């Protein structure tokens, strides 16, 4: 569900920046249509919650099938509400209507929050009504029916759902929009011309670097308590020279058992372990999962993720600026030199096509690279867990390390209820991951060739991103030179 909400928010903001004003819907009708759509969605959410409460109070269903049906119904409603809200935002030209209001420009972020309000409001209202459903579950089936605490009240419940489902999107997005507003206040022309691309790429890089702090602000995390497990994990990190700022526990209220590492900078690098992971896995299994995250650190996968995201954007911005710079060399009869190319690049179809290509290239490249990096981190974990000396064995994988890591992977999939033959968009299936490790253990050269290929792909991505940045910087320098 978070994926569709993220896409809806991004599309709403992109439509505001790229789409031309429709000038077809009067402001009164637009506001009326928006309020009508929001009221209808709120009514549907209320009716749906009432039906679920009545079904729960009847007590005729078992908890597990009821909880599964309830979760599917909730996700279905959130998807429909998000799509309907996005369609109304586009149909009534809500973005350009908000930007014509003077009071929306009084304070930074005021207009941006008003733009996103129609997309986020149905989700907030739905969570508010869903609070009654989960309270009924607790009353009928006991506290085991709901993992999230309800004692704090409806408002706290809605805030917790907002942080849990959209926190990782909203915190960086608000920071990015704030940087945009303050840049316009400081220098109105900063976001126009070649320097605009450099600003957005620099802002994105800054957000990526401070992403661990964003994660801490968006989700509830606490340091891992001192004890034998923390001592083992810190010793494992020190043994492979992976510097971490802290090991933190991510509260998921009974969510998935997982682990993640965030932060390309050693002073802002955290490993996050979910509370479910710590509760359901043994110390040896947690250590194996932790070793996998250390593999991402040692192979610099966090910095390579930044290159995957910025390489298509930087390449497009550099090509666009180059075409604009060369436009004067192609005069057209009846049109000023370069005006045709400049106008073509600024039209909505071209910009929308460029945005679509960037999204597709970034998504495909990220998925392909992520799966290779996961295999590489698996190899590192097997070597680290099975190592008996102080240096990583370059010849292959220790059999003991392979068996420990395979057991941890199988246990992790069982706890999360994942099928062994189905993978995710970042991970291959469990069967493929274990099969790859088994082949690498039998044929040590496979791991070396795989690492070399992954290194070449990473160098190519970094080269694309660096070339794009250099071209953008050169365009800015040329513009400043001609201005001065």
Image (spheres, helix red, strand yellow):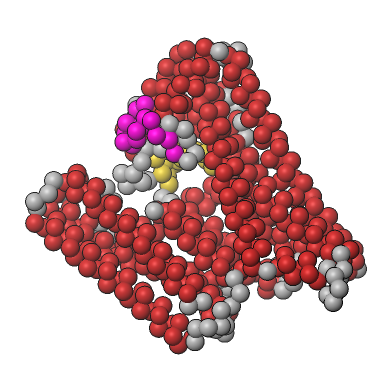
> What is the x, y in percent for residue 158?
34, 62
**Residue 453 falls in image quadrant:** top right
Position of 4 with respect to 415 (left or right) is right
Name the residue at 47% across, 17% down: 438
Name the residue at 24% across, 68% down: 46
**Residue 416 falls in image quadrant:** top left
- Residue 403 vs 366, above or below: the answer is above
Whether residue 311 appears in magenta in the rendering, the answer is: no
Q: Is residue 366 visible?
A: yes
Position of 380 with respect to 308 (left or right) is left
> What is the x, y in percent for residue 146?
23, 49
> What is the x, y in percent for residue 474?
83, 55
Which span is picked out in magenta? 410-424
Q: Is residue 238 visible?
A: no
- Residue 432 vs 131, above or below: the answer is above
- Residue 347 vs 101, above or below: the answer is above
Name the residue at 59% across, 42% down: 365
- Residue 231 vs 50, above or below: the answer is above
How many numbered circles are shown? 0
Position of 347 with respect to 227 (left or right) is right
Where the C terminus falls, by quadrant?
bottom right
**Residue 180 falls in image quadrant:** bottom right
Position of 332 with respect to 169 (left or right) is right
Q: Nearer the viewer, residue 157 or 324?
A: 324
Q: Nearer the viewer, residue 232 or 376?
A: 376
Q: Residue furthest front?
A: 333
């Amino acid at each position: 569900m978070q994926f569709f909400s993220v896409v809806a928010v991004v599309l709403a903001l992109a439509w505001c920046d790229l789409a031309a004003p429709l000038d077809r819907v009067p402001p009164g009708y637009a506001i009326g249509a928006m309020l009508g759509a929001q009221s209808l969605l709120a009514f549907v959410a209320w009716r749906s919650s009432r039906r679920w409460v009545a079904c729960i109070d009847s007590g005729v269903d078992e908890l597990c099938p009821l909880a599964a049906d309830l979760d599917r119904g909730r996700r279905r409603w959130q998807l429909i509400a998000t799509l309907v809200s996005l369609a109304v935002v586009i149909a009534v030209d809500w973005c350009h209507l908000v930007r014509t209001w003077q009071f929306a420009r009084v304070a930074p972020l005021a207009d941006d929050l008003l733009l996103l309000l129609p997309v986020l409001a149905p989700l907030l209202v739905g969570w508010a009504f869903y609070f009654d459903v989960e309270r009924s579950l607790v009353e009928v089936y006991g506290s085991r029916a709901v993992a999230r605490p309800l004692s704090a009240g409806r408002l706290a419940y809605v805030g917790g759902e907002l942080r849990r489902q959209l926190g990782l999107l909203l915190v960086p997005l608000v920071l990015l929009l704030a940087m945009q507003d303050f840049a316009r206040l400081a220098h109105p022309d900063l976001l126009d011309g070649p320097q605009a691309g450099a600003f957005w790429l620099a802002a994105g890089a800054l957000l990526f670097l401070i992403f661990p702090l964003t994660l801490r602000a968006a989700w509830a995390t606490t340091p891992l308590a001192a004890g034998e497990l923390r001592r083992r994990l810190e010793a494992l990190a020190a043994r492979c020279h992976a510097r971490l700022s802290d090991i933190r526990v991510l509260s998921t209220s009974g969510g998935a058992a997982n682990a993640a590492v965030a932060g390309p900078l050693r002073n802002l690098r955290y490993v996050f372990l979910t509370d479910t992971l710590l509760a359901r896995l043994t110390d040896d299994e947690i250590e194996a999962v932790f070793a996998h995250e250390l593999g991402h650190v040692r192979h610099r996968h966090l910095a390579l993720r930044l290159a995957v995201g910025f390489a298509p954007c930087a390449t497009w911005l550099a090509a666009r600026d180059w075409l604009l710079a060369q436009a004067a060399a192609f005069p057209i009869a009846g049109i000023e030199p370069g005006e045709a190319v400049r106008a073509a690049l600024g039209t909505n179809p071209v910009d929308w096509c460029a945005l679509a290509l960037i999204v597709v290239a970034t998504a495909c490249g990220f998925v392909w690279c992520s799966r290779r990096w996961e295999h590489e981190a698996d190899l590192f974990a097997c070597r680290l867990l099975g190592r008996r000396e102080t240096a990583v064995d370059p010849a292959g994988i220790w059999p003991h390390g392979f068996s420990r890591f395979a057991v941890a992977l199988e246990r992790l999939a069982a706890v999360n209820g994942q099928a062994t033959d189905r993978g995710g968009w970042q991970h291959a299936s469990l069967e493929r991951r274990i099969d790859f490790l088994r082949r690498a253990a039998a044929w040590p050269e496979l791991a070396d060739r795989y690492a070399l290929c992954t290194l070449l792909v990473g160098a190519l991505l970094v080269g694309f991103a660096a070339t794009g940045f250099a071209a953008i910087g050169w365009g800015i320098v040329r513009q400043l030179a001609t201005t001065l």
